[in-house]
Amino acid sequence: MFELSTNVASPRLLRRGDYSAYDALYLGDFSCQDTPANFSSHPELLAEAVDLVKAQGKKCYLRLYAVPSNHDLDRVRAVIEAAMPLPIDAIEVHNLGVLRMLREMGCSKPVHLGVFGNLYTDATARVVKDYGVTRVYPNPELSLKEAIYIRDHTPIQVLIPVHGKIPLVISETCFILEHAEHRPAEGCGALCSREHWLTRTAGGWSLKDTGRMTLSGSDLCMLEHLEELAAAKLDAFYVQSHGESSEYVAAVGRLYRDGLTRAFSGQPAGDLSAALEELTALAKMGLCNGYYFENAGRRYLGRA
Amino acid sequence: MVLMMAPGGTREMAKLVLDEGADAVYVGVVGWSRRGSEHELTDDEIREIIDYAGERGKEVRVVVNTLPSSTEIPMFIERIDMYAGWGAKGFMISDVGCMRLVHARLPQVAIHTSVGCGITNYEDVRFLAESGATHVVLPYRMTVEEIAQVKAMTGIGIEVFLFKTPSGGKICPGKCMMSSYFSYRHWLDQNGKDHFFGSASRGGDCLRVCQTNWTFGEDEGGWGRAMTIKTNPALWLDELPAYLAAGVDCLKVPGRDRSEILVRDIVRFYREVLDRIEAGAPLDLAAYHPRLESFHQRWKVERGQRDRRLIGEAEREARRADGAAAVAAAQ
């Protein structure tokens, strides 16, 4: 009926987290190859992780590094080679060069285009479809109406993020490491394991920074609009949990599993105030609706 | 011979740069390029500049590098047909789907990828070539060695900015949506054209929110420091012979949103240097440094003025939207 997915970067998070609310997991942190034990850059970790996810009856997708430079391509190729024989359900790419590489390497698995694939039009969706893409994550700047148009006119499945911080900028270098008060003598010291924020000195604006990616300060929240998503026959939903705690992933997943189940079975959403209170408590800088309703990404409109 | 392309942010600027020795001028179409309308040209102006360039044996590249909405694409194609019919020799495009459509209709025109494509490696370039691109603009973060590698691996036309940042970092333009996260508005005009204030990718101006004063640091009592989020690029010179040796085909002078006089002087400067390099004349690039430094200073002043104006626009739009939301909530 519908699929709810989220992301898991490493074996430690996979073992520690409660993913019972989710139907599918995207393995890997696409933003940074140096993230410790990142599935996106450690092919030796994949087989065991895929077994674990499959044993839970979930679909398992692999995320590839989003912004490889020339000298990173061999490393990405090695991850693809390791992934191809495994029962992975799809591979997610953000880089069009890597998409081309997948085809050249004879990859027969379905491919998902990730958020930094810069997909804005059905014309581009048709191009990537020709390279094996079966699901696209439209650019966050697109409205819900535009995402649905792309689905219908390509046609192709669209992934609709329903909760979590919005990826806004990706970086080739680590912003935290470049500006840290105390830089480690060697390596990066995994400074991103602590939370870092950008706040406007004059107040009012905030962004979360995880080193190689800058995210919205507020958490996208579509809990009040699930009936609308179900009515539009959208069927692939995603909780963006990069940089969030295991508690966050479990709680958000539980609330959306419940909300989506109700919406898809035609039950009214009912009183959402307790759920919204819980989500607000988990969001340090409040909630927003992203660009779905043609407003600035940071705005929250609530139920129409 | 390398093609020097210069900006035509206004009709006057377009003519000035052609007179000063640019081989081609690039002009943005109102509502269809990554700048505000004051730095874009109307259709009548574009036709005039195409004629002006043609009379001098020069070329025009039309910048249509927004990432449009799907429903705008028929309008996009109509415009491309019209400009090509008037004699435009090439287009700068970001959307891969639009690129493929243009190549299929007009295989003779040059298609330059825009910075909005966010290229990071030679496989990206191969993908874009398969989608119809004849030239790719490489990000100003790429080294001479990487550029040479891209040229060797792909053989495609290589275009570089005469502009670079001192460090790597956040991929801008191409993979940044910070501006529209804070300040954004969408409307349709009387012709059915979408406008997206606050989104450079979609045809509005980037409101330069990265250049306001920020504090960055660890959450909950950790360190924090004041900063702007991104470093600004600057004109470069010393690497020019190496870039030419690496196989660069087009040099792109930036500055559609700078003053006509500053852009004219920059074009005159690079024309002089390029002519000396291409003539094989002895060249001491260090002798040009004082002039380059004066451009840096003038550029910095103009950029500062523009950044302050755009950040002010972002704040005004944010306040307007906050006010509208408060009224809606009270009703």
Image: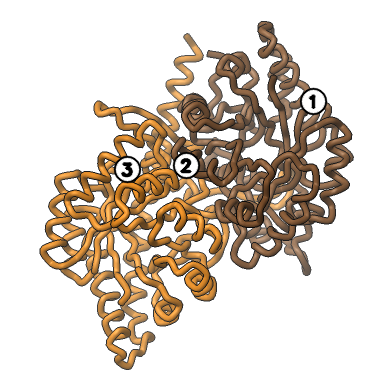
Q: Are marks 3 and 1 in contact (CB under 8 Å)?
A: no
From the image, state whether disc 1 or disc 2 is nearer to you. 2
Is residue B305 positioned above or below A58 on the image? Answer: below
Amino acid carrying mark 3 in the image: Trp
Q: Is residue B297 left or right of residue A96?
A: left
Is residue A285 positioned above or below A201 on the image? Answer: above
Q: What residue is disc 1 on?
A: A21
At label 1, counting other C-alpha atoms closer than 10 Å, the crowd grade (few under 14, some 14-19, many 20 or more) is some
Residue A48 appears anywhere in the view: yes
Amino acid carrying mark 2 in the image: Thr
User: Residue A232 occupies which quadrant of the picture?
Assistant: top right
Q: Residue at x 79, y 37 (%)?
A: A245
Q: Is residue B140 left or right of residue B65?
A: right
User: Residue A91 occupies which quadrant of the picture?
Assistant: top right
Q: What residue is disc 2 on?
A: A124
Front position in the image: A54 or A255: A54
Amino acid carrying mark 1 in the image: Ala
Residue A79, given in percent of the width and then of the height, sits at 74, 56
Q: Residue furthest left?
A: B55
Q: Are marks 1 and 2 in contact (CB under 8 Å)?
A: no
Q: What colour denotes chain B?
A: orange
Quarter placement of the N terminus of chain A? top right
